Amino acid sequence: MNQEKVIVIDFGGQYNQLVARRVRECNVYCEIYSYKTDIEQIKAMNPKGIILTGGPNSCYEADAPTYTKELFELGIPVLGLCYGAQLMMHVLGGRVEKAPVREYGKTEVMVDNSSPLFGNVAATTICWMSHFDYISQIAPGFAISAHTADCPVAAAENREKNLYAIQFHPEVLHTQEGTKMLYNFVRGVCGCAGTWRMDSFVENSIKAIREKVGNGKVLCALSGGVDSSVAAVMLAKAIGNQLTCVFVDHGLLRKNEGDEVEEIFGPKGNYELNFIRVNAQERFYEKLAGVSEPENKRKIIGEEFIRVFEEEAKKIGAVDFLVQGTIYPDVVESGLGGESAVIKSHHNVGGLPDYVDFKEIIEPLRDLFKDEVRKAGLELGIPEKLVFRQPFPGP
């Protein structure tokens, strides 16, 4: 399913998820890994391209995040963005130092249109700059392919080796033609065919779920949010009434939302599945009484969710699989992808306590960003009002 893959190596940049999303918008599958990921692991993934993110450090300092020179010798195209560009130059024998003028914000960049990165980009284009350091000398074998009034190397490239360095951020919307540049890299330089599409993802997922589950029984944690709803419908289409959805109304939804969820998934809804609604509002309110710290609230809610499920699972009897609506940002924000600090914990990441007895957890959306989950929801024919509903505020 993911025969083509571009990987993003994260150096602590604030835009790591955005880089991966932009690549996927080019219909190319993309995942984020920490710069601490071993080179052998990267080789084993056999990516079509590698993108190095920005980051807050100076690459010439002794303890700065770095990567082995071998990365640039694998024969795989590499694109360095901001810190990633500076690191590429630094590792390959160029020079990076504190810039005489710090560039921040929208900046006019003059590009060389003969570069594979800048084909069909305007000769002068607006890009988003954010850097204290600058490339004062390019590495041997490289040529400058863009500059600004204050930055002599806004981009550099070694075409022969497919190595590209960009000082600005093409992934943010302030870079007017950034999407074109990333498209030129992943589809042009890396030669990706662009086969990552939501219709085939949905179709393949349903098939894979059917094969995995066989005639097993499945319990789905339905929270009423878009993620768990899309996961539930995918399972319903794959295995029908082998699926039981437990909807825990924890009292933290907006007015009438619990009833709306029941309307769609309950006995009067369109899906062949077993639906159980648990009105557990008072239990949650009791546990949350007097707690004001958001991360504590999240942990209490997550823990209580699991308790309620455990009780319901016992009533149902033997269940083979548990389904969760985990999505890719949950994984990244919980500190399991890339180099981001833990932003917030998610009760559906990191597995379940050992007292819950299932053969396996199924997470059909674990590789998707939120906008992709919504596309999958539309592919599955879920009502638009549910697909585009704002996430409930939770804690």
Image (cartoon, rainbow, N blue to C red):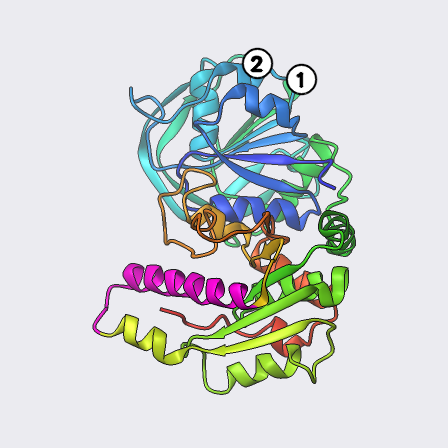
Magenta span: chief secondary structure: helix
Label 2, label 1: how far apart the Cα atoms are = 9 Å
The answer to whether any part of residue 278 appears in the image is yes
Disc assigned to residue 334:
none
* Picture layout, residue 366 above or below residue 45: below
Q: Element under label 1?
A: helix
The front one of 373 and 216 is 216
Q: Position of residue 289 (x, y in %)?
A: 24, 74
* Picture layout, residue 304 above or below residue 119: below
Residue at the (75%, 61%) spot, across then down: 239
Q: Element under label 2?
A: loop
Residue 232, image quadrant: bottom right
Look at label 1 and name its amino acid.
Glu
Q: Position of residue 361 (x, y in %)?
A: 58, 50
Q: Which residue lies under the disc numbered 1?
A: 160
The residue sitting at the left extreme is 290
Residue at the (45%, 29%) spot, across then down: 35
> Which region is colored magenta?
290-315
Determine whether label 2 and label 1 are within 8 Å by CB: yes
Quarter holding the N terminus is top right
Residue 299 falls within the magenta-colored stretch: yes
Disc assigned to residue 141:
2
Q: Position of residue 150 (x, y in %)?
A: 40, 36
Please state if 347 lies on the left or on the right of 287 as rendered.
Answer: right
Look at label 2 and name its amino acid.
Gly
Residue at the (35%, 73%) spot, across then down: 284
Residue 387 falls within the magenta-colored stretch: no
Residue at the (65%, 77%) spot, across then down: 265
